[in-house]
Structures are given as C-alpha cells and as structure tokens.
Image: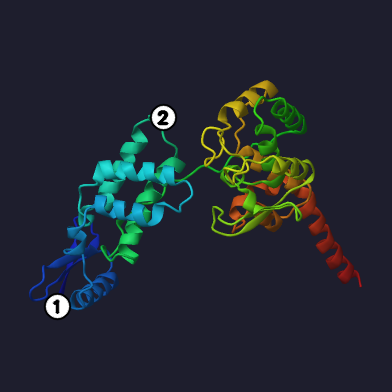
Amino acid sequence: MAAIEKRTASDGTTSYRVKVRLRGQPVQSATFASLTKAKQWATQTEAAIREGRHFKTSEAKRHTLVEAIERYERENLQGMRAKDARKQHLDYWKAELGTLSLADVTPAAVKQKLAQLADNPSERTGRPRSASTLNHYRQALASVLTEAVKDWEWLEASPMVKVGKKAEPRGRVRYLSDDERERLLLACKESANDDLYLAVLLALTTGGRQAETMGASWSQVDLSRATLQLEETKNGSRRALHLVGPVLDMLKERAKVRRIDTGLLFPSKVNPKQPVDLRTPWENALKAAGIEGFHWHDLRHTFASMAAMNGASLPELAALLGHKTLAMVQRYAHLSPQHTASLAERVAAQMVGGGAA
C-alpha cells in the first residue's frame, strides 16, 4: 500500500513524499510538488507492480544503455536518412554513459554530458557546437529511450522528458540575387566536373534538399511527365519535384548515355553505388563566381524566396518544399507582401462595398 508524507521546507515550499510498499517487492518512492500528482503516481505504481508492469528495479537494471543503443541500431538505423550522423551521436552516448544501467540514466546525468558537449569545441571544426547540434545529440538518445519504453518495455518512462531542447536561433535565409545566380550558373557550367551544373540547376529549380536530389535514381524520374518522385522525404511523405526547361532537356540527354552499373542520377566515379561528392567543385565554383556566405542548402532557400516573391502563398510554399506545417516557411512571409496586400485589398473592398450598399 502507499503512504504519503507531507513535507515543508525551510523556505515554506511544500512537497509530498510517496512510498509504495507491497509484500515481496522493493519499496518504491518519489517526491512531488502537488498532492494530486503524488496520489496519481502512487495508484499507477501500485497497479503496475501488482500487474508485473513495474520495471524500474527489474528490466531497467538488467539492461545497459549500450545494449539499448545497439538494439536500436540493429532495428532502426539501416533505413534511416542521415544514419551516419545519428550513429556518430549514438557513439558519443555509448562512450559517455554506455556502461550505466537504464535505471541509472537520469536526467541529471544526461544534462551533465550535454553541458560537457557544449563546453568543448567540435573536433572537426574547432568551434563550439551550436544549439542545433546539441539538440541532435539529445534527440539521438531520446529516440533510443523511447523505443525502450514503447516497444521493448525495458523502461517505464524516458528520462529525456525532463531534458529540454536548446533554444535554436531563427533559421537563416540566404538566397541568390539575380546577378549572383547568373555568375554561379556560369561558373558551374564552366566547371571541369560534368555533374555540377545539372545538379545545381536541379536543386535551384525544384527546391529539393541535397540528399533528395543527389541521392535520386533513374527509377524516380518520369521524363514524359517531367517529374522526379520522392518516396522517402525528410518528413516521411511523398512529393514530386517538377522538372522544367533545361533541366528536363539535360536529363533526357543524360539518360541516353547513363551508366548501366548504377541506378543513380549522379553516381560517383569511384563507387557508382554512392552519389558523387561535389564539395570541391562546388566550392571552386562559388570562389570563381565571387559568392561568399552561401551553402548548397541555400539553393533551396533561393527557390523558395523566388516563389514567394512571385506571389506564392505560405501553404503553396509548404507544398512546394514538402513541409507539413507553415512554421518552416514563415521565414519567407516578408518576401511576398504583394500577395498579402492584394488579398487585404480584396477583403477591404468587399467590406466597404457591402457597407456602402
């Protein structure tokens, strides 16, 4: 049965200490700020113990974090986009907390390791890790522990619910001016790399993510309908990219001489099963065009910005870019004032006209 003890601290705050005692079972205890939550926890915990669902002192102590991460990698990692980055994050948690039992992976322990990450510069860049990067580390561990709760029943609740995300700065929007766009495309066309110009033009005219366009295969392309079908996008939904003008013509020509040992649009010459690495020719083209502070992902921003300035509404932008919500496209709202202005004028004209009548 459960016993609840009311405690008053020196500063006057009140808390409620709960102890659940059942014959043949270890005592379970927890402290809450409200009596209601204390009673709820007592009822749920007692029921869970009686029904054999209370794992805090059994399953959670039998399995280490390393076991959980390795099972997660076996069952979830293979089909994941950006799996290399996720594995890098999981390797960190293996090294830092892997020997702990799941029962001992506490919010305090996780927060300490995240603080350690924040304090130490990245080995790759030599710069402090951004809030976004820290959130990726947090999410990697949270995904493992969520599986441990929902699917494996190794944990009752994930400690990550008490480990908040870092506040990230508002996303940057860098897009090409007309002059920059002309200079960049000319530099790409003059590049010694045979893939660069088409790859950049494809990204620039579709708004596709780098992984979506560079990892695309011929099986996704329908030249008669001028589409590139994306089956596995970042948000898990299907989406078609529309192939326009010179992009479609160049793909038709490329299809005539495509390699037979790979299905990729842009295969690597070293390993045709992997997409080509355009990092060096891309950076050389930016340098030749005299463009600074611009990344490949900004080609997507350029597409979205041009669409907004040509009157696309936020829902239309979300559909073009493959976003499920309007939050991610809100950054482009200031670029389409003529669209909202014309809408406001039509509404106002209707109201004034109706009032005059």
Task: For marks 1 and 2, give the CA distance.
Answer: 55 Å
Whole-percent x, y for residue 81 in the image: 49, 49
Q: Residue placed farthest to the right in the image? A: 357
Tell me if residue 279 comes above or below residue 133 in the rendering.
above
Q: Which residue is mark 2?
A: 124
Q: Which residue is mark 1?
A: 1
Whole-percent x, y for residue 192 in the image: 66, 24
Q: Is residue 199 left or right of residue 30?
A: right
* Position of the C terminus by quadrant: bottom right
Which amino acid, by three-letter code, is at mark 2? Arg
The residue lying at 71 percent from left, 38 percent from top is 201
Q: Camera-side residue: 57 or 198?
A: 198
Q: Residues within 10 Å of mark 2 (few under 14, many from 20)?
A: few
Q: Camera-side residue: 107 or 264?
A: 264
Is residue 15 something that shows in the picture? Answer: no
Query: What secondary structure is marked by label 1?
Result: loop
Q: If you read the primary sequence from the N terminus, does the residue marked by circle 1 or circle 2 appear first?
A: 1
Q: Camera-side residue: 23 or 276?
A: 276
**Badges 1 and 2: C-beta atoms under 8 Å apart?**
no
The residue lying at 63 percent from left, 43 percent from top is 265
Query: What secondary structure is marked by label 2?
Result: loop
